[in-house]
Amino acid sequence: MHATASSNATATSNATVSSNATVSSNATPAASPLSRCITAATRRRLLPLSALMMGSLLSAGIAQADISDGVIKIGYLADMSGIYRDLAGPGGLDALKMAVEDFGGSVNGMPIEVLSADDRNSADVGANTVRGWIDQQNVDMVAGLVASSVSIAVTRILAEQDTLGIVSGSAASSITNEHCTPNHVHWVYDTYPLAHGTAKAIVDEGGDSWFLLTADYAFGHALEGDVEKVVNENGGTIVGKVRHPFPTSDFSSYILQAQGSGAKIVGLANAGSDTVNALTTASQFGVVQAGQSLAGLLIFLNDVHALGLEVAQGLQLTTGWYWDLNDETRAWSQRYHERNERMPTMVQAGIYSSTLHYLNAVAATGSDDTAIVRARMGETPVNDMFANNGTIRADGRMVHDMYLVKVKAPSESQGEWDVYDVIRTIPGAEAYRPLADSQCELVKG
């Protein structure tokens, strides 16, 4: 396993091409004028940085002395070929490269280099890849990180090696709770706001008896626990639950158990193709027609697109971002669409946002030192096309608004990617676990 993981990581990293990351125009096909432009709002945020760079750094030599090897290296680790490919995958890598391009391809005159690897949803592969990146290639920051089991394994390596990581794709709230470290930040979402946003809204509307269908690994367990807590605290009951292997293609027996439970709500505590397969099976078995409702506890834009509105219509879910929220999200998403021929998921948007925030911190401090950069990131509000006045807490949680949405009926949609109605904005302070309830050693006591 170790030898295979190491060789795979090396091959993938070399194939990704550091030169393509440094010379950003080589990373994607020729862009249209719209793709080449940065939104006005983004320019307004980058211009103060330019002034700061010129005013705060007395010479290139000072910056050179503080960037350990004269290059900023970012390693992108994600599922590039499996169940979570469309959630982050190659599209997330391109979002990261968009951030590098928009930043100018260098920090204080030093190039930005991007490596990437497919973690194959394996904690061993992910950990071995990151260890090799740090030991052999001096990677400064690890981005992406989708499967929760991979992220938890990788963040342990980052803490041991004093390297920074930004988790964008993982859902487990434990990543900034019992598994927190001073070396990583959790950017887009986690199971706590998913459970509180979706489950509480459904219980409040009368959906007070639940059957949970859960993916049997770290993320699924975390989401299941958070949903149980929310349902019970708000007067509901969990009448049954079943865990399925990750991944699973045949959900027939699990859906039959859910139907036999008599629960009003069948909650899907899974993700990716598992969710798509479960919803497809539920549709085939007539779950909704028989009087039960389905709750997608982690549904992404790509899932709804794959299912189609005929199957997904009426689903309520919580998301950390949506491409059609406002003019700024639409402008950035159009640029992304021109490069990738699809609209971005919240994870892909979060990868762009977090990469820019990291690069801003490196430029402002003139350093790639993990503690210095992490401190600067925490001091600086996140204001971009992803978040408005987002903040990074001591536990590493980036707190920002979340959105309760409902999937449109086909007759309500005005285009291929017009799939959500925003029902409610959930303020960040309300959405995420209070620090007072945290088990994170960085904030306890």
Image: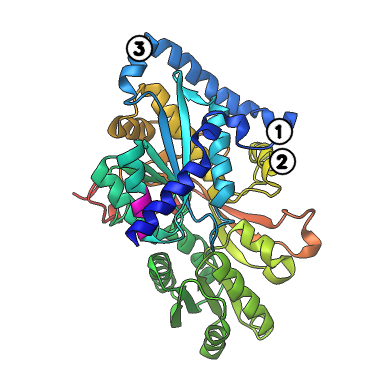
| 264 or 16, nearer to the observer | 16
Report which residue position mark 2 lands on: 338
Relative to 424, is 219 above or below?
below
Q: Is residue 127 found inside the magenta-colored segment of the image?
A: yes
Q: Main secondary structure of the magenta part?
A: helix
Q: Which of marks 3 and 2 is in front?
A: 3
Q: Which amino acid does label 2 sit on?
A: Glu
Badge 2 marks a residue whose secondary structure is: helix
Which residue is the site of mark 1? 31
Residue at (49% x, 24% y) in the render: 106
- Of residue 356 and residue 78, the one placed in the foreground of this image is 78
Q: Distance between the residues labelled 3 and 1?
A: 35 Å
Does residue 379 appear in this view? Answer: yes
The residue located at (62%, 62%) in the rendering is 303
Q: What element carries label 3?
A: helix
**Residue 388: percent from left, percent from top:** 52, 38
The N terminus is located in which quarter?
bottom left
Disc 2 crowd, CA 10 A, few/some/many (<14, 14-19, 20+): some
Q: What residue type is labelled 1?
A: Ala
Graded by Cα atoms within 10 Å as few (under 14), some (14 to 19) or many (20 or more), the crowding at tag 1 reads few
Q: Which residue position is annotated with label 3? A: 61
- Is 49 contained in the magenta span? no
- Look at the image and give the residue range highlighted in magenta: 124-129
Q: Is residue 150 shown left or right of residue 203?
A: left
Identify the residue at image location x=46%, y=48%. Answer: 11
Q: Could you tell whether 276 is left or right of 166 in the image?
A: right
Whether tag 1 and tag 2 are in contact, CB under 8 A, the answer is yes
Q: Where is residue 233 in the image (x, y as percent from the top left)?
A: 39, 70
Can you give x and y, in whole percent of width and height, for residue 59 in the image? 38, 9
